Amino acid sequence: MTREILIDPITRLEGHGRIHIFVRDDGEVDRAYLQIPELRGFEAFARGRRAEEMPQITSRICGVCPMAHHMAGTKALDDLYRVEPPPAAKKVREMVYDAFMIEDHALHFFFLGGPDFVVGPTAPKAERNILGVLGKVGLEVGGKVIAVRKELRGLIEEAAGKVIHPVFGLPGGISKPLTPELRDRFAEGAAHALELAQLALRLFREVVLANPSYVELITSEAYTHRTYYMGLVDERERLSFYDGHLRVVDPEGRPFLSYDVHDYLEHVAEHVEPWSYIKFCYLKDVGWHGFTDGAESGVYAVAPLARLNASEALSTPLAQEAAEELFATLGGKPVHHTLATHWARLVELLHAAERMGELAADPEIASPEVRTLPTETPTEGIGVVEAPRGTLIHHYVTDERGIIERANLIVATQNNAARIALSVDKAARALVHGADVDEGLLNQVEMAFRAYDPCFGCATHALPGQMPLIVEVRDLRGELIREVRRD
Amino acid sequence: MSKPKVAFYWCASCGGCEEAVVDLAEQVLDVVGAVDIVFWPVALDFKVADVEALADGEIAASFINGAVRTSEQREIVELLRRKSKAVVAFGACAWLGGIPGLANLRTREEILAEVYRDLPSVADGAMPREEVEVPEGRLHLPRFDEDVRTLDQVIPVDYYLPGCPPPVALIAQAVTALVEGRLPEPGTVLAPDVALCSECPRRATKPEDLKLERFVRPQEIVADPETCLLAQGLLCLGPATRAGCGAPCVAANMPCTGCMGPTGRVRDQGAKALSAIASLIAPSDPEGVAKVAEQILDPVGTFYRYSLPASLLHRRVGTDGGRPAEPSEPVAAAGGGEPR
C-alpha cells in the first residue's frame, strides 16, 4: 500500500513550506514534493503605482532582506529614467548594501544554519539553536555577533532612513549624502565586521572542518547536485553584489553564458507547477526537462556557493584566500555540495566586510553630490543585484508619466526553487526507508533546504535553526499509521 | 511570582515585524527577560498543542502581525484570542491591512492570471490549483482567498501597535505596560495620538497657511534638507499620520508615506490624507483645483498605501454601480485546501 508522509514545517501554524513524501509498497520513496503554499501577488498590485514608490513597495516582499528589493528597485528606476547617479551615490549604495549583506549573512550563520554544524546535526534538539551555539562558542563570541549586527543595523538606519524598509533610493541617486562623520563610523563598523568574519571562519575550521564526520556529511551524495550556477560579476569576472553582468557556468565549471541583465528574458524562464505557488526558474538556453540535474537540465543555482562557482575570483585579498581554501579542500571548482553553501556564506561575509572597508576609505564617498535629476521620459527599466539568497531582478514597464503598467520580479529563492526541490527529494530518498522515520530524518531533510537560506515568502527564517515539525505517515484512506513529533 | 506569558504570531506578513522583535531582543534584553514567551513560531519550538493546553486567558498578551488571508491563520488567531487577556494587532498589516492589502485592488483571478500566465518570464506549466493529481498521488494547496483582511475583521482586538514595522521604542513601551498591568482603554493605539508633524524636526519650517500651486515627485527636485517637505511640494503624509516613529523617513529627506496609520479621530486614513492634501491646493476655481489635483498620480496607492483593507473602500469597487464591496465570507468557509 502506498504511504504518504507529510512534513509540515510549521505544524499547521502557517503554510510557508511543506514537504509531501510518497512512499512505495517496498518502503522506498517514490517522490518528495516541496510545496510553497503562499502567494501575495506583488506584481499584480504594482500595476497603477508611481514607479518611484516601487523600491519602498517591493521591500515589503521581505522584511528580512528589504534592502535587496529596495536596491534592485532603485537600480531599475535608474534604468527606467536613463539616469546615471553621481559616483558618490553609487558608492554609498554599495557600501550600505555590503553592511546589509554582512548582518544578514551573520544572522543566517549564527542563528539559522550554523546550529546544525556548530552544535551538531545529531545533537539533542533542545540545544540545536542559537543558545546551543552560544554554549559552544562562548558568550564573548555571541556578544560580538549581537554587537556587530546592532552596530551595522544602526548605521544602515542612519544612511537609508530605516533598516527595515529603507527609503533612500531614488532614480539617479540617493536622498541624502553621507556625512564625513557617518563615513568614519562606517569605517569602524567595517573593521568590526572584518573581525567577526574572521572569527566565524576560524570557528568553521575548528568545529566543522576539523571533524571528519562533518566533512563527510558535506560531501555526501545525498546533499550533492551537479547543476549550472549563476551570479553577478564585475568586468573582470569577479563576484559582485551590487552591479555587473550575469555569468553562468556549466556543471563542469566552464563558462556557459555571459549576459547583460537587459537580456534576462532570453536566458531565464519560469516553469509553473500546479502543486506549488512558487515558480521554478530555468535556463532557457538548456530548457526545462523536469526536476533533474546535470548538463542536460536547465536547473541552476544561485546564492553564496553558486556565486563563488560562477565567478573567477573575489576582488578582496582575504576573501580570495578563503575562497581558494574552500575549493582546495572540497576538490576544486565547481563545488556541487549544497551544504558547502554555509562555508561559502562566510567567505562572502569576509568579502563584504573588506569591500565595506574599502568604500568607507574612498575619499569621494562623502561628497555632497548624490543626485542626478532625471530628464528622460520613462518607458522600461531593469535592475539587478545579488540578494543574500541569490540573483534578484526587478523589471518595470511604465507609461510616459512613470505609472507602472507591468512589473516582473525574479526573486532570489525562485532561481533556486527547482534545485531546492531536487535537494529535498534526494535527501528524502536517501534517508527514508520503510516505516523508520525519526526525528533525525526530519532535521536532515530540513538541512537539505536550510543550506539555501530559503526565503519562501520571506518566512522560513526560524531563528534557532529549527522549526516545529510533524511527520505523519498515513495510508491511502488517510488513516494515521504513525506520527513523529518534534516538540 | 511567575512571569507574565506572552505570545507572538505572524499571519500574511513580510517578516519585518519579526525582525523588529529580534532588534528589540538584541537592544532591550531586560524587557524580553521580564516575560515568559509561550509561543513564537519563528523563534521558539512551542506548538499549537502547547497553546491549546493553556487555560483560557492565561496568556497576558498576544502580539499578532500580518493581515489575514487563509483559514489556517484564522484558526490560530481565534485560538490565541481565547487564550489571551489582551490581543495586540502588531504593525500596519494587522491593524490596517498594510502594503500587501493593496492586493484588494485586484481580484483573485486577476492576480493568478498575472503571476502564472501573463508575466513575460512565464514559459510553461499549469496554474496552481487547490487539488492536484500527480503520478504518485494527490497534493493540496491552501486556497488563495478573495481578499486581504485586517486582524480586527477576524477577531476582536484590544490594542494596536502602528508602524511598518512598529518602532522598537513603542514595542518596548507596550510590552512593559502590559507586563506591569498598566492596561490602557481597550481599542487604544499604543502611540501618541497626534499627527507626525508635531514631532517632525522640520515642523518650524511648515507655514501656517501653506498653499501649493503644484506638487512635485521626489525624483523631480533635490529637496532642501531642513525645510518642511510639504512646503516644497512633496506629498508628505505627516499631517494625516500618527506620530511615534520619530520621522526617520523625513530625516532621510524623504516624505512620510503614512505607515503609522491615522490618529484617533480619523476613521479612514486615506480620506483624511486626501482632504489634508486637497486643502493645500492654492487655486480656488474648479479649473485651477483640477489642474493641481491632476498632478497627484495614483491617489489610491498614495493615500491608502497601508490602509485599503481597513478603509471604507475595503477593496476595489466592482462594476455594479459603485457600491463598496462587503468583506467576503469568513476565510474558513472559503478554505478547504488543507491536507488532512
Image (spheres, rainbow, N blue to C red):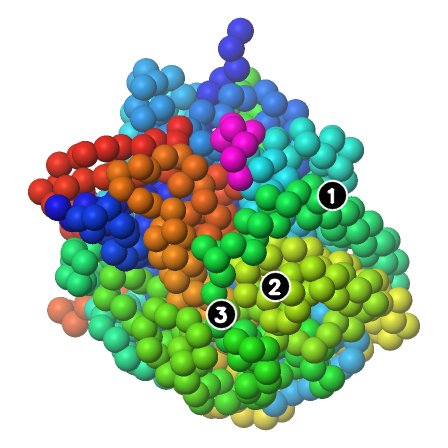
- Label of residue A206 in the image: 1
Nearest the viewer among A392 and B222 is: A392
Nearest the viewer among A236 and A332 is: A332
In which chain is the residue bearing label 1? Answer: A
Q: Residue at x 64, y 71 (%)?
A: A333
Q: Residues within 10 Å of mark 2 (few under 14, many from 20)?
A: many
User: Is residue B168 depicted above or below B29 in this figure?
Assistant: below
In which chain is the residue bearing label 3? Answer: A
Residue sitting at the far top: B1
The reply to whether residue A263 is visible in this rendering is yes
Q: Residue at x 45, y 79 (%)?
A: A295
Sequence-wise, the earlier of marks 3 and 1 is: 1
Element at label 3: loop
Q: Is residue A122 magenta?
A: yes
Q: Which residue is mark 3?
A: A226
How far across and down, in percent of the image, does residue B109 sit?
21, 69
- Amino acid type, mark 3: Arg
Q: Which residue is mark 2?
A: A304
